[in-house]
Image: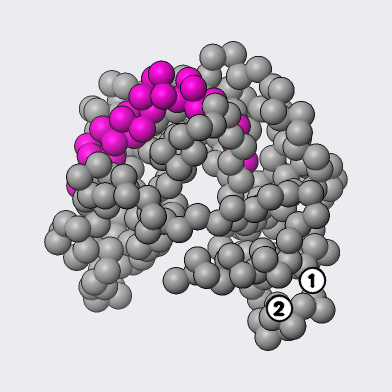
Amino acid sequence: LNFPSMRMWFLINPPSKATIEVQNIDDFKWLNSSYCSVLRQLESARIKEYYFKANHPSSLSAGSDNLKYRNPKYLSMLNHLRFYLPEVYPKLNKILFLDDDIVVQKDLTPLWSIDLKGMVIGAVETCKESFHRFDKYLNFSNPLISSNFSPDACGWAFGMNMFDLKEWKKRNITGIYHRWQDLNEDRTLWKLGTLPPGLITFYKLTYPLDRGWHVLGLGYDPTLNLTEIENAAVVHYNGNYKPWLNLAVSKYKSFWSKYVMFDNPYLQVCNL
């Protein structure tokens, strides 16, 4: 639905020093339910029942049935496409991945020359003391998880990542992702999102980047250090308080809004 408008936006507003290629997910013939676990799960009646049919509100408020866990966005193929980067870009050996809710504030060229030391992904770690370790994302009461991963392993951030695609292919990363996604069809290993399967897929294959490259939490945490945000190469509005929404954290909004072309006639009809 968004493909023609995305193409038109960049034709009308070409960035001065970049080439933009907008691809249509419908053109990825390899992306089918016989190859892709999430697509296969989406076709399952049980999954459709779980994600798309709301029960009585009272039942949604309890524990694992909390409404946020039933949001279909967590099964969106655009969300899971990050696990298919070698298929999307078969000729590339290295790629810098950026989420759509980030703002780039500094030149990211130096990331290209960072030695990942044989790892597949470069990411900023998110664990401070006990926060954001594996036990926050994965169900360690399940023996499949507890026997394969450490609950104290450090979590890291999706959203601005360097990927070594040669190493990816050598280690069959997409195959590892498929295996764990299949094992989690009943949602007992983790509940939501692409980060838990990412932590699993890239376990012991992640190179920690300096924290100054990627400051996140602008979409949910109002207590972040403003100096760290100002000095960050990339700031990430992960969470629900996106800067283009009325519920955005006001003190973070300018880091996004200063790049918006408010005189653009199309943007003027948006509620920004």
Q: Is residue 163 above or below residue 184?
A: above
- The crowd level at tag 1 (other Cα within 10 Å; few <14, some 14-19, many 20+) is few
| Quadrant of the drawing holding the N terminus | bottom left
The picture places residue 228, in percent across and down from the top left corner, at 80, 43
> Is there a contact, CB below 8 Å, between mark 1 and mark 2?
yes
- Quadrant of the rendered structure where residue 58 is? bottom left
The amino acid type found where label 1 is placed reads Met
Q: Residue 160, which numbered label? A: none
Considering the numbered disc 1 on the image, is that residue within a helix, a strand or a loop?
Answer: loop
* x and y percentages locating residue 231 in the rendered image: 84, 42
Tell me if residue 177 is in the magenta stretch.
yes
Give the x, y percent position of residue 263: 82, 79
The residue tagged 2 is 267
184 left or right of 17 in image: left
The reply to whether residue 77 is in sight is yes
Q: Amino acid at mark 2?
A: Leu
> In front: 116, or 238?
116
Q: Earlier in the sequence, mark 1 or mark 2?
A: 1
Residue at 37% across, 63% down: 71
Range of residues picked out in magenta: 160-186
Residue at figure coordinates x 20%, y 45% from the top left? 34
Residue 101 falls in image quadrant = bottom right
Tell me how far mark 1 sits from mark 2, CA to CA.
7 Å
Residue to which mark 1 is pinned: 261
Q: Residue farthest to the bottom?
A: 269
